Image (tube, helix red, strand yellow):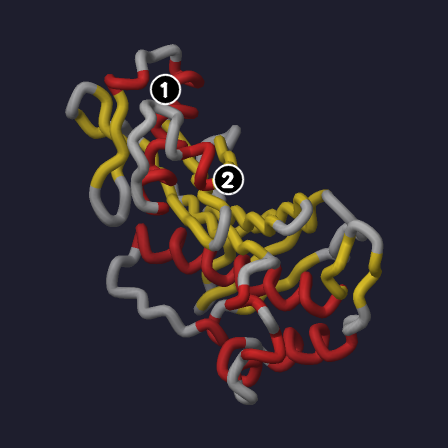
Amino acid sequence: MSVGNDVVDLDDPECRLDGLHPRWAERVFARAERAAVAAASGESAGGSRPWSARHRLHWALWAAKESAFKAKKRGAPATVFSPRELVVELAALPEANGVATGRVAHRGEMFTVDVRFDGACVHALAWTPDALSPILARVAAARDAFTIQDLTPVSAGDAARRLASGTLASALGLAVERLQVRGRPPVLLRDGEAIDGCVSLSHHGRFVAFAASLAP
């Protein structure tokens, strides 16, 4: 079983489409994906949604690719990230908050993908057919994840680990100190022993996130 996740902060300066290399889309998106992005409206909806349909679709496709790559690499560590080979098919994006469902194909292997929208946060989950459900996932502002276990400031990567271990410990009915997320790719440990399952971490801009699939 394998899961992957990726989070994007639409307000982060890195996400400005006019700041990307002119050939960025050609290098990253398959032909059908480029056509879908080009056809999406580039105008902001205004009000509480300052991001255009094109902006949201662009980064939804990227997050879907990243999440599927993480899921693939866990089972096949030699996999190299080649975004155009990860071909995304998504249902219509929600107009505001909500979920777009779809799939990502990579060299004959298929991953189910959900892309969740919540304001400026885009969170993609990808998983293989044998992943155990329910898949546990959560996104938090990095500043909140810093203090899940104590008041010590940590890096965004460590904040994502804290978010995962704190959330999963609660779900499993364990004291948080009994559960740790370590290594790369991350492994979930209970009392120092690996738990059967997989966990994926991500962070970008103001957000940290995780997804996990655990054996009973």
Q: Position of residue 169 (x, y in %)?
A: 36, 19
* Residue at mark 1: 169
Q: Is residue 130 visible?
A: no
Q: Residue at x 54, y 66 (%)?
A: 13
Mark earlier in primary sequence (1, 2): 2
Q: Residue at x 72, y 43 (%)?
A: 98
* Residue at mark 2: 141
Q: Residues within 10 Å of mark 2 (few under 14, many from 20)?
A: some
User: Which residue is outermost to the bottom?
Assistant: 22
| Near-viewer residue (207 or 196) | 207
Quadrant of the frame with the N terminus = top left
Q: Position of residue 20 (x, y in %)?
A: 54, 79
Instruction: Using the numbered discs, state the Cα–Cα distance from disc 1 to disc 2 in whole angstroms.
Output: 19 Å
Which amino acid lies under the numbered mark 2 shown in the image of this protein?
Ala
Query: Can you tell which quarter of the image residue 90 is in?
Result: bottom right
| Near-viewer residue (54 or 199) | 54
Quadrant of the frame with the C terminus = top left
